[in-house]
Image: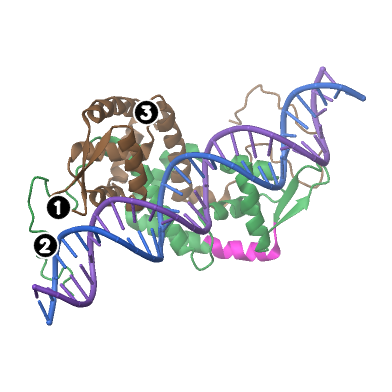
Chain colours: A brown, B green, C blue, D purple
Amino acid sequence: MTATAARTPPRKRTTNGAERQHDADEIGLDALVGHAGYAVRRFQIWIFQDFIKTLGDVDIRPTQYSVLTVIGANPGLSQMAVAKRLGIERARLVHLLDSLEQRKLVKRIKSKTDRRSHALHLTAQGETALAKFKRLADEHERHVEAKIGKANRERLLQILAGFT
Amino acid sequence: MTATAARTPPRKRTTNGAERQHDADEIGLDALVGHAGYAVRRFQIWIFQDFIKTLGDVDIRPTQYSVLTVIGANPGLSQMAVAKRLGIERARLVHLLDSLEQRKLVKRIKSKTDRRSHALHLTAQGETALAKFKRLADEHERHVEAKIGKANRERLLQILAGFT
DNA sequence: GACAATTGTTGTCGTCAACAACAATCTTCC
DNA sequence: GGAAGATTGTTGTTGACGACAACAATTGTC
């Protein structure tokens, strides 16, 4: 079916010159439709926007959440270990941790076995905060499920499991 | 070079103090494994890196490729139309087009029906260049296929078709 | 013809990946 | 034991990118 039932497209313009009109969404993507990267990018933007909005009240962004989660599950990790595991540059992690430490969610403890490195731990406050973040993140995940369907979401996780 | 020769993980450190060792990849992701956003993000980074590398000789990035493709398939589009279709901010598209125009791949032609807007076209040089870009992009796409499997890639495109 | 909306543009801000360089420290190897 | 090389955290720079805000020129609407 041709969709767009009774809607009367009010012919935005009376002009109809040399340039074709391309009524809004009739613009073809051409080769882009066959590229996974394009779809994945658009999806990733959508998913991050929803995450940021859903965790907006607690002001936690996806990367921050991933850092907190990994530290929470593996106390005592060095910055290098966290950076490598999450694919974050260690230079970037420095700023992330600066912020999280200022917010009293994380603490850097000087390692005694290697005086170059810091052992990362959640503060007591960080633990309870993370629990709340996880509840909100689950809520976000349900948004994803509602968007693409339960089976599709699980299939997606399965397909991309190798990249985590 | 020692490299993975006899496969004897040479116990990087002799220390084994208070902090658990977390031998490289035995670090758990905890709640992250159930989040589509994390997997999608990691995958998107991988896919973009491969795209950038594969199209490295011609110095074309994913966003530039998407803009060229849409203009090539829909000559005469306004900047606003392209921006909306690809989910790019029109402010950002200005710089992208500046660059592509300097490289003689795209030209902005003053519209006669709406003197505010520009009609976007590929140059002759842009057409032949885009053809080459498409061949390289297809090569990149085969890398994706090799990475996640043919069936998985198609399923992925199907799942995410709504976001394009 | 006054007023609102659109288009392209410029600018700022914050996030993020990619490098490079550095001091402190640890490891390795002679 | 000590020199040479590697690692860790840090600082800084660069560039791509998304999100906004403001503006002039132009168009649409009432």
Tell me which label, 1 or 2, sits earlier in the chain.
2
Q: Which residue is more in the foreground, A56 or A51?
A: A56
Residue A161 falls in image quadrant: top left
Alpha carbon separation for disc pair 1 and 2 = 10 Å
SS state under label 1:
loop
Q: Is residue B88 left or right of residue A67?
A: right
Chain letter of the residue carrying label 1: B
Amino acid type, mark 2: Pro
SS state under label 3:
helix
- The residue tagged 1 is B23
SS state under label 2:
loop
Q: Are marks 1 and 2 in contact (CB under 8 Å)?
A: yes
**Region rendered in magenta:** B122-134
Amino acid type, mark 1: Asp
Residue A140's disc number = 3
Q: Nearer the viewer, mark 3 or mark 1?
A: 1
